[in-house]
Amino acid sequence: MGYIIENANILKETKLTKSSLLIKGNQIVAKQNHIRHNKFMKMNADSFIMTPSYVLLDTKIPLNTSFQEFRKYMIENFLLKGCTTFITSISISYESELEDKIKETKTRLINSSIDFLICVTIPLRMLTPSFIRKCKKVRVPAIFIEIVDLDELSKIPWGWIREALFPYNCPLVPIISNELKKEARRAMSKWKVIMENGKIPSILEELTENQPISIKVLNKLGLYPQKASLLHGSEVSYNLFLKAREILNVDEVGLFHYHSDRLVVTVNKGKVVRAGEEVLFKPGFGEYVRVRTPSYFAL
């Protein structure tokens, strides 16, 4: 049996709009200004700010720890923050270890209560057509590239890289090494020029860990609008914040960082996982998300 969420104040990045949502199971089957159905139970959400649940990047998840420590980490770093999907990345040193390391990480995350994606992090020297083909085979959603030497960027055969990425086109994501932090602006400028001139599928800035990933980036990863969305056809994963005058003009990132005390409900794939201070950790409810096609949705 479905239900209707009426008068939802939906915050999407910086824009606040009012809509009503018809929910059936784990899917939003209608989104309109008003939904007139008398046979469905109705919930008035006017006293809340509603956001899609967040997707966070976290490359430091403790994989070699006890179940209790893992559970504590998941609750504190994801569920209490309104996150129902996370992205992590594993370091790869040799092509031959790619598939085994991904399988090992999936196994270690078997008790995850929220969905997850596994990306890979490599040194620039490993960015070859051969390695990219292996990443395409196992549907790696993104390849993080450690940049240590700016001059090395110019030595990569970017035409071959673009051809190897096609047609799957998983994006390349820059990581500026500690040695280059003082030159971060110049490094990102060079990265952007090379990516845009070479028409390389890529993210043009470093991704910040532990804060909501933007819709633009999620789309490039092939996650949007399946995740972090309250559109027709999306899964039912959302947060409810107690509405107050001081948060009516706050964007999603500001809400996440500075008003977490107002987060009172989190729903994950149609199930309430947080109500007030009560958090439900359900081992194994999370699934490994296999991306089909990055950037398939036109923003």
Image (cartoon, rainbow, N blue to C red):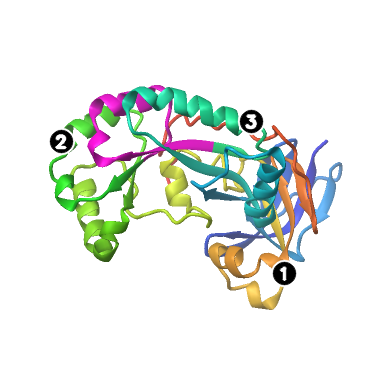
Q: Is residue 209 left or right of residue 180?
A: right
Label 2 is placed on what type of residue? Pro
The residue shown at (72%, 35%) is 283
Label 3 is placed on what type of residue? Ile
The answer to whether residue 243 is seen in the rendering is yes
Q: Secondary structure at mark 1?
A: loop
Residue 49 image-quadrant placement: bottom right
In whole angstroms, how far apart are the C-alphas of marks 1 and 2?
52 Å
Q: Is residue 278 above or below residue 26?
A: below
**Magenta residue check for 220:** no
Residue 249 picture location, percent across and down: 58, 73
The residue range painted magenta reads 117-143
Q: Which of the two discs, 1 and 2, labels the residue nearer the N terminus?
A: 2
Of the pair 113 and 231, the residue shown nearer to us: 113
Residue 172 image-quadrant placement: top left
Q: Nearer the viewer, mark 2 or mark 3?
A: 3
The answer to whether residue 224 is seen in the rendering is no
Residue 97 image-quadrant placement: top left
Q: Nearer the viewer, mark 1 or mark 3?
A: 3
In whole angstroms, how far apart are the C-alphas of marks 2 and 3?
38 Å
* Labelled disc at residue 230: none
Q: Is residue 71 above or below residue 137?
A: below
The residue beneath circle 2 is: 157
* Labelled disc at residue 243: 1
The quarter of the rendered structure image containing the N terminus is top right
Q: Secondary structure at mark 2?
A: loop
Label 1 is placed on what type of residue? Lys
The residue beneath circle 3 is: 110
